[in-house]
Each structure stands twice: as structure tokens, then as C-alpha cells.
Amino acid sequence: MMIKELDQVVVRFSGDSGDGMQLAGNIFSTVSATVGNSISTFPDYPADIRAPQGSLTGVSGFQVHIGAGKVYTPGDLCDVLVAMNAAALKTQLKYAKKDATIIIDTDAFQKSDLEKAAFKTDDPLAELGVDPDRVIACPLTQMVKDALADTGMDAKSVLKCRNMFALGLVCWLFSRDLEIAFNYLRDKFAKKPELAAANIKVIQAGYDYGHNTHSSAMNVYRVESKTKEPGRYMDITGNKATAYGFIAAAEKAGLKLYLGSYPITPATDVLHELSKHKSLGVTTVQCEDEIAGCASSVGASFAGALAVTSTSGPGICLKSEAMNLAVIMELPLVVLDVQRGGPATGLPTKSEQTDLLQVLFGRNGESPMPVIAATSPVDCFDAAFQAAKMALEHMTPVVLLTDAFVANGSAAFKLPNLADYPAINPPYVPEELKGKWTPYMRAENGTRYWAVPGREGFTHILGGLEKDNLTGAISTAPENHDLMTRLRQQKINNIQVPDLEVLGDENDADLLIVGFGGTYGHLRAAMDEMRAAGKKVAMAHFKFINPLPANTAEVLKKYKKVVVAEQNMGQLASFLRMKVDGFVPYQFNQVKGQPFVVSELVNAFNEILNK
């Protein structure tokens, strides 16, 4: 056995969707974040609700990248692959490096398992060209049964602990402190201490197996933290960070938070998380459908709450009419769209960026709406806060775009100090306008004043029919409709967003890489790799898409070559061409339902440089 000091390492857990790979991966990432490593994770769920056990389509994966310094992606290929059955090995080997350590459960490689995984021989390692010296092959299932033989647990419950043995073995490989994992399990199973004790026992058994086994594949790795700022950290998913961002915004604005939602993958975790926080003034309503979820949030906004509705792409289609109701009534509303693969049901557990044009233009009439795109799991907190602040201060619905990659992925999150965040000041109608006020009277920046129902002297009616600018009465006058349309657009145009930041070789780059939202980490890693190879490359990443940053045209026209990289067929590129005269970029587009691969980005960008 030898100890290898590494700056970064990638581990991928894989097995049946019922094997608990997500839990094992989450615990390992939590342990790593707690000791100060930078982390980035990628849960890769099957789209089937419950594929047959041992089948190729039912494999679930969880990849975690841990680093001594900052890591931006979950990694292209893994250094350690855990394959809990034959199907997992067959489908996940492509995500492993040529010299990766592979851990397999030999009890799940029986003849029937090999047949389900469509192996043609009884030697899967040879068939796949895997060097046996790289493999830690152990009778994992049997060892779990032995470890729990004296607990009285039923056979089904015992088998559910297999993931903890694999976790214990991986913790040994990376010299992890098991006490952090034990505490995680004690908290998770606080109401079932016997279950926590069983899982802890199995983790210890896996750790001891690694310690006592002398395999040529066994190396102990250490990844020491080098750059972590002092503070309290937690491993947080994008969906949880989004929920916390909304709670923080409501507290800062002095408002109750209301979420009207309908469950949909991959957005449902936001509903689950917010439902736990009634003590913080959060109200959640699981409605009968997407339309009701959005319409109830419009009602809550009218009543004076910070109102949010959450969904994915198919739900945006259904919510569009109610979103437009908030546009014409000029009420604050945050619409969270956790993008997934489409069209139709598409790839519900996979990630894309294919809703951009839908949220910009996918409603009837002229219906301008701000759009913000979160760039990472941790950034989901700030993006949710900023979306809520924008909605409340400018009396408009705001779309917050995340995607399955950042929503389900996780990273080390330094707990913020809310005192450092800006105030949120909704434009409540001034008291001096009492007796003079009409519903569409505006502040200097064009924002409609907000009168919360029940405030004496400010009785009013809002609705979906066009209203007269001066009186608030229903109006079909041509000039008034033209005026109201322009006022609603100008209100959005007046919103000030931060300038577009250029990273890398800002002043002399031969290529500018442009993206938006959740691809930030992969594009940043590609830029860093190219610059390390001596190339002059810069990067500009959009978080604020509507309105665009004031310096957008200046940045995009500064460089001879610009490539817009997106997980769609060119939606941001199309929007930028519309907004910036003479902008004709190169494009890199993939719609695979999987994150970008950094090496593929580097190759494609180098080809553009060499043209």
C-alpha cells in the first residue's frame, strides 16, 4: 500500500436505482466538504420510474469531484469507479479513466446478472478489456450480511445497507474521518436509531476491509485543502440553495413567502425543502396542477406576499397564461424553471438549456419578463435572492432559470451573513397619494406602486383585461394599449443589472467563450486549460439575460472570434444576434442530456482558433 498526495480526484458511485448510490455519494461529498475540500457533484438518475433490477437502463450514478483548490465541474472521467452490479460496470466504465481503480461486488456478477447486462461471456472484465489488477473485487453483499447477522434485520433491509459498505471502502481510500459520516447518519435516521446503528456498522466494515486487504489496486489518496476561506460550510444542492435564497429574500423584505407548486422532476425538491420551514413564515401549497400553482401564487402576490411558483419546462408551457396575468397586473412573482431534457416528457432526469427562448418569448402578446440564470449549485442562493429582489422592487414576474445539473448537483457552501446582502424595498404606494391614487400610478423609474389589499384608502381592482393608464378602468382604446405596452417594456428596460465580466485574457484574447447559466464551470475549466497551454482565451458568462448587461455589445464586439456554447441548438446565440447588431458568433451546441465534457470543449475551441 502507498499513499498518493493528489490535488484533485473524481469518484463515481453506480448501481441500481434502488442501491442508494445518491445517498452514498451525498455522504462522501458532505464528508469532503466538511474537511475543507472544494467539491462539485453530478447525480445521474435513470429516466425510468423503476427499471427492472440489474437492467442496463436502471443504472443510477453519482459523481463527485474533490479538490485541494477550486474545482468547477464534477470531472470528465473518474479516478475511482464503484460498480455495484454487472450492468453498472458495463454502462459506467466509459466514465472511468484508463487507470481508474474499480470496486465491484462479485456477488452481483453471477450468471443471471451477466445475462441481464447483456454480457456475452462469463468474464466481464476480459470482455470489457479491464485490467484485473485495477479491480478491487469483493463479495460485498455477503460481507454486509455477515456484518448485520446479529441485528435481527430482515433480508431486504440488510441488502439496503450495501451502499454503506462501498462508502466505507471509499472513505478508507481517501483517508476520510468516519465520524463525520456517522454523525450524518445519526441525524438522517434520528427517529430510527437502530437503522443508523446498522448503517454505521456497515460503513466501519467497509473501511476495515480496505484497511485489511492488500490489493495491488489499493492506494490511499489524500486531497488536502489549500484555498478554503474560514467559515461554516455545508454540502448543498442547487435546489436547496434556491429554497434558502427565497427564504432569505422574504426575511430581508419583511414579507411572508408563498410557494404554489405542482410536483415535477427535477424541481420538486424546492417544494419539499420549503415545506419544512413554516416556522420561518413559509407557506407551501401543492396544487392540483401547474396552472393552479401559478395562479395561486399570483393571488398570494396580490395579497402582499413574496410569491414563487416552481416547475420545469413542461410546466412553464402550462403556467404561461397565469404568468401573463402577473405581467398585465404588474405584480411581483418569481417563476423558477429547473430545466430538463425535452421536448414533451423527453428526458425528465437529464439536463438541458432548452427553455431560454420559451421563457423570453413563449407567451401571447408583448409580455416582457426579466430572466436570470443561476451558474452553479451555490450560485442558486444568490440567484434566487436577486430574482426575488428584482420582482419585488420592479413589480414584475421574473423567471429564474436553473437546470437539472446545478439543481441536483452540490458544492461546498459557505454559510452567508444575511447582513451583507442588500435591502429589498418594494415600491409601496406613498401615504400622501391617499385619495389621489389609481392602480397604475408609477414611481420615477416606471414601476407601478404596490397597494396591498386592506390598506385603508387604497381600494383597487386589477385584472387580465387592459386598463386605462390614468383611471385603472377597463380600456380598449388603441393609444392607451400602445402606451401601456411601452410602459411595461420600459419598466423592464430600466432594471439595472451588473456589467458583463470578462475572465482570462480580457485585453488580448484571440477567442472569447460565451455561455449562460449552469455551463459556467465547464466553460471556465476549458478556458483555464487552454490558457495553461499558452492560448489567449477569455470568457464572458451571462447570468442576467433580460435585460442584458449594458456593456454586452461592447464586450461581444471587442474580440475577433467569439464562440457561444450552449446545451441547446443555439438559443442564446440567436437572442444575442437579435440584440447586438452585426454579432455573428461561432457556435458549439450539444443536446445530450449530460454536462459538457471539458476535453471536447477544448478540442472544439482549438479548432475555431486554428481556422
Image (cartoon, grey):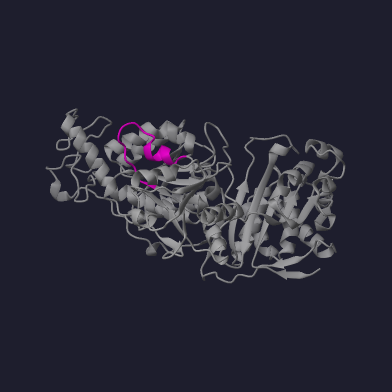
Does 181 sit above or below residue 273? below
Q: For the magenta stretch, what is the residue range?
A: 355-371
- Which is more toward the observer, 107 or 348? 348
- Residue at point 84% right, 54% down? 132
Q: Quadrant of residue 605?
A: bottom right
Name the side, left or right, on which 156 lies relative to 384: right
Q: Is residue 402 magenta?
A: no
At which x and y percent is residue 302?
A: 30, 39
Residue furthest toward the front? 611
At which x and y percent is residue 38?
A: 58, 63
- Residue at point 21% right, 37% down? 484
Q: Is residue 362 magenta?
A: yes
At which x and y percent is residue 582?
A: 35, 48
Can residue 398 be seen in this snapshot? no
Name the side, left or right, on which 341 lies relative to 298: right
- Which is more toward the observer, 311 or 307? 311
- Residue at point 53% right, 63% down? 535
Does 522 sit above or below residue 154? below
- Which is more toward the observer, 201 or 404? 404
Q: Quadrant of the N terminus?
A: bottom right
Can residue 385 be seen in this snapshot? yes
At which x and y percent is residue 147?
A: 81, 54
